Amino acid sequence: MNHEIPMGMRFSLLHRSFRKKMDEMLREKDLTGVQFGVLGALMHMERSGTEEINQKDLEQVTHVTHPTMTEIIKRLEKKELIRCEVSRRDRRYKRISSTDKCQSLQQAAKAVEDETTQWLCRDLSPEQLRQLEEITDVMLRNAFESCGKGCDCP
């Protein structure tokens, strides 16, 4: 391998490898990356115990505009990945929740991620894998500190 490749380019190439595999899986499922990101944010909020999630919550977390999010929600509901119901707290809002189909999609994405990681790391020893995790943990902590958002920073 060429040791002249700058570190930033190395990260970019690794990111592209992951994106390529994820994009292939999303194309097969007829989804866009933005739609998948919204589903991921929704499921993260559900797992963290957010009692009721509405469109405005998703807009804030994903930084997607109101009109765009409206269309995304319509498409995801049509694909039966989310369910929209009238809010129990405020009838002006729709309560958004993931479906079993959405959770299956997330499991498929996790499998693609795991497979890609194993493929990229196939020549590393168990000790090197452990070191890689430790090093990237430090790097992520530094990145999160620099953005001023703590560990919620994507």
Image: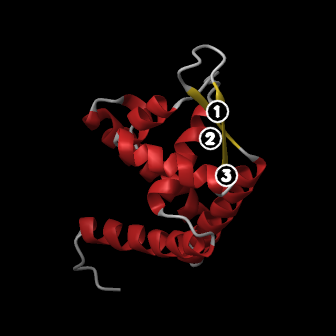
Q: Report if residue 110 is visible in the image.
A: yes
Name the residue at the front extreme: 92
- Residue 8 placement, left or right of 121: left
Dot in front, 2 or 3: 3
Q: CA distance from mark 3 to mark 1?
A: 14 Å
Image-based side of 148 in relation to 74, left or right: left
Q: What residue is at 74 percent from the left and 56 percent from the top?
A: 104
Q: Position of residue 11 (x, y in %)?
A: 34, 66
Callout 3: few (<14), some (14-19), or many (20+) C-alpha neighbours within 10 Å? some
Residue at image position (61%, 75%) is 28
* Residue, disc 2: 43
Q: Quadrant of the N terminus?
A: bottom left
Q: Please provide percent x and percent y for residue 40.
A: 56, 47
Comes first in the chain, label 3 or label 1: 1
Mark 2 / mark 3, whichever is N-terminal = 2
Q: Reply above or below: 2 against 115.
A: below
Q: Is residue 110 above or below residue 62?
A: below
C-alpha gap between disc 2 and disc 3: 11 Å
Residue at the extreme right: 100
Task: Name the amino acid type tagged 3.
Answer: Leu
1 and 2 marks in contact (CB < 8 Å): yes
Apparent side of residue 114 relative to residue 3 in the rendered image (left or right): right
Residue 81 is labelled as: 3
At 22% from the left and 80% from the top, the residue drawn is: 4
Task: Tell me the number on the disc at residue 46.
Answer: 1
Where residue 98 appears, as percent x and y from the top left, is: 68, 42
